[in-house]
Amino acid sequence: MRIKQVSVFVANEPGRLVDMLGPLSDSEIDIQALSVADSTDFGIVRMVVSNTAGAVKALHDAQFTVRINEVLAYDMPNVPGGLLKAVVEPLAKMGINLEYIYAFAESEIGKAKVVLKVSDIDRAEDVLGKG
Amino acid sequence: MTIWEPQYEKMTREELEKLQLERLQQKVKSVYEKVPFYRTKLQEVGLTPKDIKSLDDITRLPFTSKSDFRDNYPFGMMAVPLSEVVRVHASSGTTGKPIVAPYNAKDIDTWSNLMARTLASAGAHSGDIIQNAYGYGLFTGGLGFHYGAERLGATVIPVAAGNTKRQIMLIEDLGTTVLTCTPSYALIVAETAQEMGIDLAASQLRLAVCGAEPWSENMRVEIEAKLGVTAIDIYGLTELLGPGVSCECSYKTGMHIWEDHFLAEIIDPVTEQPLPYGQQGELVLTTLTKEAMPVIRFKTHDIVNLYPETCECGRTMVRMSKVHGRTDDMLIVRGVNVFPTQIESVLLSVEGVEPQYQIIVDRERHLDEIEIWVEVSDAIFSDEMRSLEELEKRVRAEMDSVLGISARVKLVEPKTITRTEGKAKRVVDRREL
């Protein structure tokens, strides 16, 4: 299903993540998933949060550059081959490119979640389902 | 648009040159008699004031440079006794002792009048509410604009630079119609208003008169769009007068130099030989009416073009282009001459790039390296690394194709680059040359 993701531009320097996460914590925003893409000079922090609008406001107030966009998120079985069979293979078969992906295990045993950005969100949703 | 002094501003070339020659002869005579510095310089080249028979003879006179003011600090260049001086301004003196600019009562009167002429040329008129956000004090900007605006018959708000939120409040509450400040400060005002959720384009503000630092055409577009104004470029120098040497008219096709008060020449910055109109070179100015401290053939270090054709506004006074750069902050990077303003134009031509940047020049293993820091705004930010890398690549490719320099581009967070309320520090040169 489609969800909103918050991306933040962060300098690749010690302590910058502290500056970024502080305002979110102060605004009582829960981070449900997070990944960081890094280059030499900067990183892109991508997050799924409990309150998107609140997170954007807190980050803007702290003068961060922020962007919201739609990504797909799915539950999948946390078993060998789970990601492969449930997500990656079906997309590859349809010729849909994965721009980036991050996944994490949930506290409930046998369950995992995956967040993905694809080249064609409509077709990907047709393949993987809307629920 | 009203022309403040049509009898001068629309003079025929012939009338103007006659007036200029009279005034030049008078000035040369006066400095020869009263300023030992000029007498010695003229004697060294075997000239007396009588040798100035035509305007072309000016090229026989020696140049005056910034260092001459330093060598004669503080009052050695003065042509009147200190008791006649009613006011002293000074340059910021970032590169040593400041340059001291004395004025007698007549100079203040001339200056006020020229600033009224300048503001009228920019499109201001009596009845305007002029918020003057130039620094007051030793800097010529604050008081120069202030006296000119009063002479024009406008209402002046002498707010000075800084306290941006208060500036915005005053613009809204007092119905400011004209903002006068440096171009970089105009952008700070625009950005701050945006952050406060205030749309200044909806205010009474219609004109910004910006100067005291070089700025590009693209920066003008930004200021005009964000503040909802016409932005006009103005030029001046502490050594000669302060603001009020030249200013654009509403046609924005160059800044009219007030030639009844200043004689303009254009020279090759290296050979110091005169260049024909139209060619890019260093501007040289001679004051024709200044009394307390007349200046002969001052090398401004500013690189400009001069256009002599009569302007659509009807003024005959020669127009100078925006300052393309300064001979002293021209960067020579691996043998290529680059002005920071050129880098700015290239940057702003890339969609979404904000005019907040800094140029860092360094030398690694005997090679000059240029790094350009560009702030990432929400508009150009992307969740995909690839788009950001493409942006860096695009800026790099433009720098290479337009300026012929290879630069490293570094994307930085907003507000990483220091904002200034006076002049922006665009270049950090770490080379120890």
Image: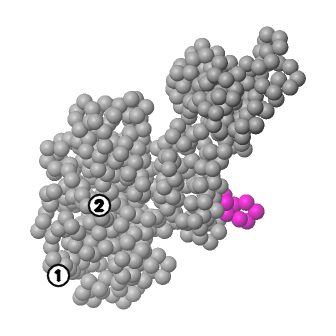
Q: Report the side of B412 relative to B107 (left or right).
A: right
Magenta: main secondary structure equals strand
- Please indicate, yes or no, whether residue B41 appears anywhere in the rendered image: no
Do badges 2 and 1 share one subunit? yes
Does the magenta-highlighted stretch encompass residue B364?
yes
Question: SS class of the residue under badge 2?
Answer: loop
Mark 1: amino acid: Glu
Q: Position of residue A2 (x, y in %)?
A: 61, 24
Q: Which residue is mark 2?
A: B252
Q: Compared to B136, does B213 lie above or below?
A: below
Q: Which quadrant of the view contains residue B82?
A: bottom left
Q: Position of residue B250 (x, y in %)?
A: 24, 58
Q: Compared to B374, does B334 lie above or below?
A: below
Q: Compared to A74, does B255 lie above or below?
A: below
Residue range in magenta is: B360-370
Disc number at residue B14?
1
Q: Position of residue B374 (x, y in %)?
A: 57, 47
Q: Report the side of B128 relative to A37 (left or right).
A: left
What is the basis of the colouring in this image?
Answer: one colour
Mark 2: amino acid: Lys
The reply to whether discs 2 and 1 touch (Cβ–Cβ < 8 Å) is no
Q: Which quadrant of the view contains residue B90?
A: bottom left
Location of the N terminus of chain B by quadrant is bottom left
Q: Which quadrant of the view contains residue A62?
A: top right
Q: Earlier in the sequence, mark 2 or mark 1?
A: 1
- Please indicate, yes or no, whether residue B341 appears anywhere in the rendered image: yes
Q: Compared to B161, does B268 lie above or below?
A: below
